[in-house]
Image (cartoon, grey):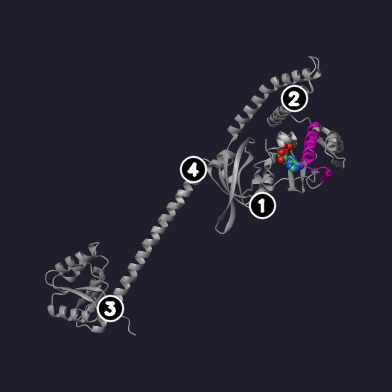
Amino acid sequence: MPEPTPKADILVIDDTPENLNLLSVLLIKHGYKVRSVTKGSTGIRGAQVMPPDLILLDVNMPQMSGYEVCHHLKADDRTREIPIIFISALEAVSDKVKAFQAGGVDYITKPFQIEEVLARIETHLTLRRLQSQLQLQNEQLQQEIRERKHAEEKFATIFQHSPNPIAIVTVSEGQLMEVNPSFLSISGYTRDQVIGNSITQLHLGHDSTTFLRRLQTTETFHNLEFELLTHSGSVKSILLSFDRIELNGTTYALLIANDITERKRLENEFISLVSHELRTPLTSMMGSLDLLSSGQLGGLTEQGQQVLSIGVKNAERLIRLINDILDLERIRSGKITMNRRSCNLADLMIQATEEMQAMADRSKIQLSTEPVSILLNADPDRIVQALTNLLSNAIKFSPAQTTVQMQACSSGHTPSVCISVCDQGRGIPSHQIQTIFERFQQVDTSDARQKGGTGLGLSICRNIIEQHGGRIWVESTVKQGSTFYIELPLNT
Ligand code: ADP
């Protein structure tokens, strides 16, 4: 089946009416729409008002030659793109060259062959259509590129100017791929120092190894408190959130931080101020209560004794809380320095067990300690404080008739010793494994009342262990039990 001839609008400019007629009839017969004029100037105007798809233009015309008409049409934006085919009786090569120089796309000599005219017209119409299509696609592409660039610029600006430090790191290694200026300004590093290095290589925090493990095992996390170690060695408190992102087919972690150093400082200052202010009247209150219960000021009824003992119990709890707060604050701020000396871990394990034996007996829990004789360079009182704290928690959160086990083993790889306290208690939900080491974080808020805890014990433990260059963590399964680990470096 023959291809249907596309409808196209053709303008014929020729001063010879016979020629015009001949061409018009021929083109109309083949399905084209034809406009014909005998003068160049009329042709130009017609083309400007309603641009045709193609122009057949006679070279030899009296007032304005075909070349001149062509020049005019090519000089006008409205008509520049219309393909022009010259028609002439002249056959010299120079004429053809002139026609092409004027901007014509083709040249037909008279007397013309019908088939040739039709074939040339069709070829140039197709070319023109393809060209327009290309132009349109090109414009669309340009527009898309502009829009993309615009969007990219927008996000790049947000990234560059965000007041929050942002970093993109690999999930497997924690390698920094991209950071923004806020990140550089808070960490004190230059771009060259961080890009390509990992969080652990740069030692961006005491617990950067734990953080990396978390990055690998958790999809997303919000507002994780993190102590950032800057290039100059100072510590900044930040809240870290991260989420997984896909970039060019690879999964990365997007880290966004919030600097809370100042807020934290004010908070600490406030807590320690309030604690100091509370301690004096509380101690005096405790003295008064003691005096009352001693009976020196007269006897009390049995009910009075009961009320008094509730008062004493609560005052003791308050004093414990305040002492813990102040203790933590002093360790954190370095006001209490670790009094390191050579000591045997076995002695410390035995001492901590003996201190907790009475509590374990009351709770019907068996304490099983396997002392290991290893020489440590540590503050013995503080290490015992940390161990008793872990034992006390293990006892507190375990049911009767279970065992709490304390063991230790040394590792020669990086000379260190790992002490574990394992219980068969209620366990800790996985999302709270990290937060319980923060101040006042308790899995169950009713614990404080029931168990007399302050939510500060693990925070104090962590500070003591970190001051010794070690680390503390927990592995736990809900309803099955928890194992707390303390790793201390040897030979330091
Ligand atoms: P607290 O004074 O409440 O014991 P800690 O800082 O020592 O404060 O512990 C924080 C919280 O961690 C506890 O309130 C408890 O919810 C949880 N926890 C600590 N040790 C254990 C454990 N061995 N088993 C279960 N939960 C524990």
Q: Tell me which label, 4 or 2, sits earlier in the chain.
A: 4
Q: Quadrant of the C terminus?
A: top right
Pointer 1 residue: 217
- Is the residue marked by circle 2 packed among few (<14), some (14-19), or many (20+) residues within 10 Å? few
Residue ranking furthest to the top? 297
Rendered location of residue 442, percent (x, y): 69, 39
Q: Nearer the viewer, mark 4 or mark 2?
A: 2
The residue under label 2 is which amino acid type?
Val
Pointer 4 residue: 161
The residue under label 4 is which amino acid type?
His
Q: Does the magenta stretch include residue 402?
A: yes
Q: Quadrant of the N terminus?
A: bottom left
In magenta, the rendered stretch is: 381-410
Disc 2: residue Cβ within 8 A of ligand 1's nearest atom = no
Is residue 469 positioned above or below 253 on the image?
A: above
- Is the residue marked by circle 4 packed among few (<14), some (14-19), or many (20+) residues within 10 Å? few
Is label 3 in a helix, a strand or a loop?
A: helix
Q: Which of marks 3 and 1 is in front?
A: 1
Residue 120: numbered disc: 3
Is label 4 in a helix, a strand or a loop?
A: helix
Disc 3: residue Cβ within 8 A of ligand 1's nearest atom = no
Q: Do the residues labelled 3 and 1 touch (CB within 8 Å)?
A: no
Kindly identify the residue that appears in the image at 29 percent across and 74 percent down: 124
Pointer 2 residue: 307
Q: Are marks 3 and 2 in contact (CB under 8 Å)?
A: no
Q: Do the residues labelled 1 and 2 touch (CB within 8 Å)?
A: no
